[in-house]
Amino acid sequence: MKYILLALLTMIFIGCSTKVPVVTKYKINIPSHSIQTEISSNSKCKKQSLKVLQSFSSSILMSSEMHYVLDANKIYPYSAAGWASTPNRSISDEYFMMLRDLKFFNAVQSAKSRTKASWLLEIKVEDFMQYYEKDNTKSFAKVSIDLTLLNANGSDVIASRNFHSKVNTRSLDAQGGVIALDNALADVLSQSALWISEECK
């Protein structure tokens, strides 16, 4: 009997002392950069208000789990890395903050705002992922986003365009992927701002 108790106590001790891997949480952190674009004070956007809608994406990008792609089409989760906020939400927030700061429009509202806007910005995230080549000797990040400007009154499409960027990672790990995704998203945001400024003319 005492051997059974000793065995049970040993198993409990081993179970309690097993170290669970710590999951590192990453947030999207866009590098500081200046977007070189100008619009006149009498542009058509200055007369409009814009609401940035919550982005559409695959369910993977609506999760706080961090995934990577191996050999073009095999998706795996990182076991010790995750997102502090889902990519889907973070991308919407980045577009809102960028457009608010650029002051293209009379007012810019987030998706949570109850106020009505004259224009809507739809965001569809087609790709936001780190990729590894089959031999694991190279990794890169891909970001692809579709934007559509809509007239809120009739939901008519004002303009629509896809933006994409690919950035090689500096290291073959989750941190390297996050840094590359930050830079690729920054590039897509810059492309988007230039496009919107042209549509405002």
Image: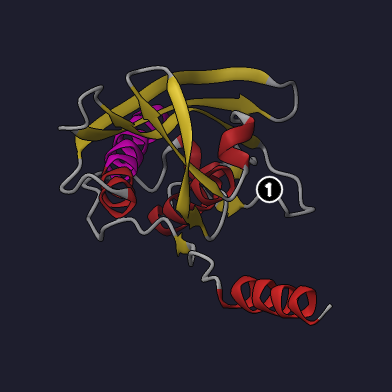
Residue 24 vs 77, above or below: the answer is: below
Q: What residue sits 48% from the left and 67% below the top? A: 22
Residue 48 vs 200, above or below: the answer is: below
Location of mark 1 (residue): 111
Mark 1 neighbour density, 10 Å: few (under 14) some (14–19) many (20 or more): some
Which image quarter: residue 154? top right
Specify the amino acid type for callout 1. Ala
Q: Is residue 92 left or right of residue 175?
A: right
Residue 29 vs 128, above or below: the answer is: below
Helix, strand, or loop for circle 1? loop
156 within the magenta span: no
Question: Range of the magenta residues?
Answer: 184-201
187 within the magenta span: yes
Residue 86, horizontal then vertical, whole percent: 57, 50
Q: Is residue 56 left or right of residue 130?
A: right
Using the image as rendered, state which of residue 186 and residue 23 is in the foreground. Answer: 23
Asked whether residue 122 is in view, the answer is yes
Q: What kind of secondary structure does the magenta stretch mostly adopt?
A: helix
Q: What residue sits 74% from the left and 77% below the top? A: 3
Using the image as rendered, state which of residue 140 and residue 6 is in the foreground. Answer: 6
Q: Is residue 190 left or right of residue 159?
A: left
Which image quarter: residue 17? bottom right
Residue 16, horizontal then vertical, whole percent: 64, 76
**Furthest-right residue in view?**
1
Which quadrant would the C terminus be assigned to in this image? top left
Which image quarter: residue 196? top left
Asked whether residue 200 is in view, the answer is no
